[in-house]
Image: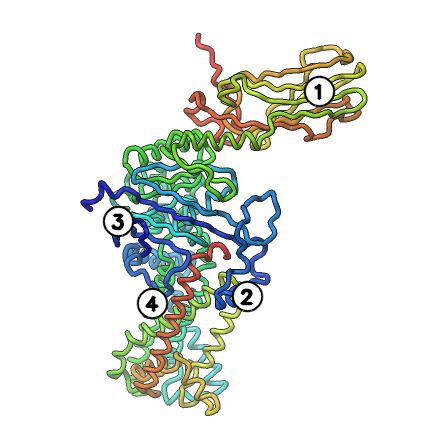
Amino acid sequence: MGLFEIMNTVIKVENISKAYRLGEIGTGTLSHDLQRWWSKIRKKEDPFLKVGEVNDRTVKGTSNIIWSLRDITFEVKQGDAVGIVGRNGAGKSTLLKILSQITAPTKGIFKAHGRIASLLEVGTGFHPELTGRENIFLNGAILGMRKHEINRKFDEIVDFSGVERYIDTPVKRYSSGMYVRLAFAVAAYLESEILIIDEVLAVGDAEFQRKCLGKMADVTKGEGRTVLFVSHNMTAVSSLCKSGLYLKNGSMISNGNISSVVSAYLGDMEKIERQEWIGNKGNSDLKIFRTGVYPEDKINGFHTNTDIFIEIEGEALNPIIDLVMGFRLWSQYEYELAYVLHDDTQEEHIAFPAQKFKKVFKIPANTLAEGSYKISFDIGIHNREAIIEHNYCDLSFSLVNISGLGRKYLVGATKGFSSLIRTNWLVK
Amino acid sequence: MDNTAGTNYESTENYWNIVVKPVDTLFNLKFGQIWLYRDLFWLLVRRDFVSFYKQTVLGPLWFFLQPVFTILIYSYIFGSLAGISTDGVPRPLFYLAGITCWHYFAECLNKTSAVFVENAHVFGKVYFPRIIMPFSVVVSNLIKFFIYLTIMFIMIAWYVHKNEVKGVNIYALLLPVLLILIAMLGLGIGMIVSALTTKYRDLAFFVGFGVQLLMWASPVVYPLSAAPAKYKHLISFNPMTPLIETFRYGFLGSGSFSWLSLGVSAVNIIIISCIGLAFFNRAERTFIDTV
């Protein structure tokens, strides 16, 4: 291994594509297989693999073959930490499955130098009847470790997982939290040269997630191992990875420096999210022309530490009694966070005067945590009619946390915590 | 190895220890990788064994009760009721010799044929040479085989003492060869079935039925000499037949032995296991997409 200083490309992916067959497998596949076999004998193109179709879930394709990945080519240097980002269904998991040799590509070649360990889901191969100790060995061996390696790391693994008391109890008696902690600990202490990680941070409590992030930082920065990391958590990706890869509908959109990859991804996300609606909708009493959501600092975009404004523009043609006009704010987990009306501060019933109007609501900086949000408008006459139909001019936006506020215990990564309001402590 | 990278280090023959292509060679056994995962192999064997008796009340005793019950039932049905000849060997011993071989074969086949479907959750998450799973099955089943064999030795000693059987002769030394051949046959057929069941799930239903059918086509409850003339040709073509006959010949001194039929059976088994390996290697690469 004297050549190691110059041998620095450890993963080389060349034109990898992967096709999946849609629909129910097992019906009619035998006849398809026979046709495929027949065309193969005659050296013809596979009749069921139509080239040129892009993986887009919203558009119905013409064939029932879908390309989950198309012509992916990239290289990874030794010691690099690569973040793979993209929407759900962009092909991230498929790419990781090919890299971890769980499934073979339909086209292309993938080469690697060194042992690859994948952490696509923690706890793989845990047997409920076996004890924690036995499972550490079995799981470690499944992930490619030798017995003496596990022996050497055993105490550290148990220590990290914090299940020392139950180490000789069958894992079927463990709580799900203990189970996950033990499983992550085994994987975190793997001695493979290349580590593949998919969304492990979605499990466990905030305290444990912090521990995992810390361990991953050690792995990438301290131990100099090569890491491929898939996550929807842009903060984690940005802080852990040096370079990135952005996948969209199975194709690679950008590859390079992590900050440029993340901003390309977020830029696309903003285009998908509707932040302004313009039109002319209503009845003979009230028209709505525009709804919008925007951050105070429009250049830097939606961050947790800027004020966010929500606007409604329209015209009342006649005075309206009992007008209800406002919005609901939803978190990405479909929790309703707020229901706000334009006249919440008024005490008595006054008719809404005939006028052109523009109502602006401010969500102060550091109120909402990192994540995606939806705004749905509620405009109508109290107990009588809806002037704007439900979901008509809805808006959405995503907040990124770059300030670091609320990061200590990862507000927002845990379901149900969608606010940073707890940071507003007064110093006295 | 595809080396289009140019003249630098990356084109060195052994630099890339993992190369994944859409089509791979079918008979690649990947011995190097299997060797790397040898600890996993032993842990799987241990897991199979431990988890088998951990859930039971009688524990390891089951391993003894199973053959004893089978012998009793066979002796009654095929011996007392049907009156099928056993070549002059006491019935319990004759049946035990048959099922010792047969159960090992059937277990290897059944467990191997379910390997993809049963381990889909593990195979879908992490890579290791899949073939380790069926190999570990073959070895963990050996434990059962040797328990049967122990019971058989006790019975042989008893019957030799009563002067009812001739006892073990030099051909019993063929036991390792017989064991390997039985394991290979079970593994070979099992691998073919396992590969096909990843796509055509109905095949799994035929396996249980097929194994039973195959048992009647093997000299388990009857000696080859007592087989009806009409089917004798078919039965001696069955690769299991010479194996069971040789086994009985070596340990009980009954039945027939010929190097020729054993050789033919061995060649057939090697062909079957090569086909099995090819099927298995093909299936392991993409089965997770279809299972």
| Number of the front mark, 2 or 3 | 3
Are there few (<14), some (14-19), or many (20+) residues within 10 Å of tag 4? some
User: Mark 1, chain letter?
Assistant: A
Residue B112's x, y, as percent? Answer: 42, 65
Residue matched to label 4: B142
User: Which residue reaches farthest top?
Assistant: A428
Dot 1 lies on which element? Answer: strand
Residue B205 vs B7, above or below: the answer is below
| Number of the front mark, 4 or 2 | 2
Same subunit, labels 4 and 1: the answer reads: no
Are there few (<14), some (14-19), or many (20+) residues within 10 Å of tag 3? few
Same subunit, labels 1 and 2: the answer reads: yes
Residue A60 vs A232, above or below: the answer is below
Residue B110 vs A188, above or below: the answer is below
User: Mark 3, chain letter?
Assistant: B
The amino acid type, in three-letter code, at marker 2 is Gln
User: Which residue reaches farthest front?
Assistant: B6
**Residue in the image at 76% along x and 22% along y:** A382
Residue matched to label 1: A325
